[in-house]
Amino acid sequence: MNNQEVAHLKTCSATEFAYWGIKDFAYIQPVLIDGQPAMAVHAANGTELAVLETFAAAQVAVLQNDMEPLSVH
């Protein structure tokens, strides 16, 4: 990331920031579905993309879609 990109991120709106990295990153977060633990995969803007049974399965799905998995606790 260059200085110009950093400067833009510091001044962008919340909406712009939410879409930054939408094609590059996916967030993996533990959830409960019908009382069962699962892992939700979300785009950078918060849109739910998938729910999988395990963290490993979520990581594989994210990597197969050419994105970087990030963990949310």
Image (cartoon, rainbow, N blue to C red):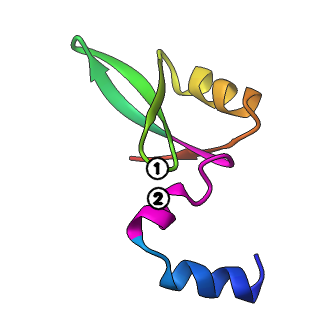
Instruction: Name above or below for residue 69 compared with residue 49.
Output: below
Mark 1 touches mark 2? (CB < 8 Å):
yes
Quadrant assignment for the N terminus: bottom right
Instruction: Name above or below for residue 33 compared with residue 31.
Output: above
Instruction: Name above or below for residue 23 compared with residue 19.
Output: above
Instruction: Name above or below for residue 69 compared with residue 58.
Output: below
Residue 61 falls inside the magenta stretch: no
**Which numbered disc, 1 or 2, marks the residue that appears first in the sequence?**
2
The three-letter code of the residue at mark 2 reads Ala
Region rendered in magenta: 14-27
Local secondary structure at mark 1:
loop
Residue 71 is labelled as none
The three-letter code of the residue at mark 1 reads Asn
**Which image quadrant is residue 34 in?**
top left
Q: Residue 41: percent from the left, percent from the top?
A: 49, 32
Residue 26 falls inside the magenta stretch: yes
**Which image quadrant is residue 5 in?**
bottom right
Rate crowding at label 2 as few (under 14), some (14 to 19) or many (20 or more) other CA atoms within 10 Å: some
* Residue depicted at x 32% and y 28%: 31
Q: Residue 44: percent from the left, percent from the top?
A: 52, 49
The residue that mark 2 highlights is 18
Farthest residue, direction left: 35
The residue that mark 1 highlights is 45
Disc 1 to disc 2, C-alpha distance: 4 Å
Rate crowding at label 1 as few (under 14), some (14 to 19) or many (20 or more) other CA atoms within 10 Å: some
Q: Nearer the viewer, residue 41 or 9?
A: 9
Q: Nearer the viewer, residue 47 or 33?
A: 47
Local secondary structure at mark 2:
helix
* Residue depicted at x 73% and y 33%: 63
- Is residue 3 left or right of 45 when viewed as pictured? right
